[in-house]
Image: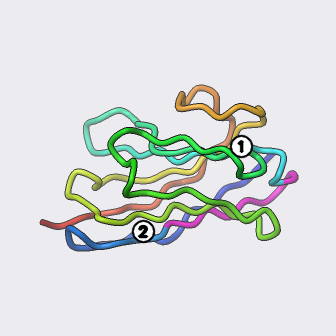
Amino acid sequence: QVQLVESGGGLVQAGGSLRLSCLASGRTFSGYAMGWFHQAPGKEREFVAAISQSGDRTLYADSVKGRFTISRDNAKSTVYLQMNSLKPEDTAVYYCAATPYYSIYNDARRYSYWGQGTQVTVSS
């Protein structure tokens, strides 16, 4: 079992920045690739970014490329999502997720463990 707890969400104006954190506990953090997803009201959960177990590979949704950066610190069992140039359409609940696979995925079905989510609201 892996427990995930997100933090860092909040209210920010368009063009602003936020950094989300996801602290993992339980099994060895470095054994899991990690992902961030978001879900806006009335919409399905969507992929945002993913990072490999060692952090040497990343994957981004087209909508966030060049604005968001995913990173991880295995010594701190934490994955981060730095979000810059935020837009109102980025408003959603953001979830981190863990998968035991070596590959990184944009498919939520590949992820075994999920956090409870943190709200990000971007005002125009």
In which quadrant of the rendered image does the C terminus lie? bottom left
Q: Give the amino acid at mark 1.
A: Ala
Q: Nearer the viewer, residue 60 or 12?
A: 60
Which residue is situated farthest in the left direction here?
124
Q: Where is residue 5? Give x, y as percent.
A: 62, 61
| Residue 115 falls left or right of residue 76 | left
Image: 113 above or below 18:
above
Q: Marks 1/2: CA distance?
A: 22 Å
Q: Is residue 41 magenta?
A: no
Q: What residue do we see at 62% from left, 59% from top?
A: 71
Query: In the image, which residues are magenta?
Result: 20-28
Label drawn at residue 9: 2
| Residue 49 falls left or right of residue 56 | left
Q: Is residue 22 magenta?
A: yes
Dominant secondary structure, magenta: strand
Which residue is situated farthest in the right direction here?
28
> For mark 1, what is the residue?
33
Query: Is disc 1 placed on a helix, strand or loop?
Result: strand
Q: Where is residue 39? Give x, y as percent.
A: 37, 43
Foreground: disc 1 or disc 2: 1
Image: 82 above or below 39:
below
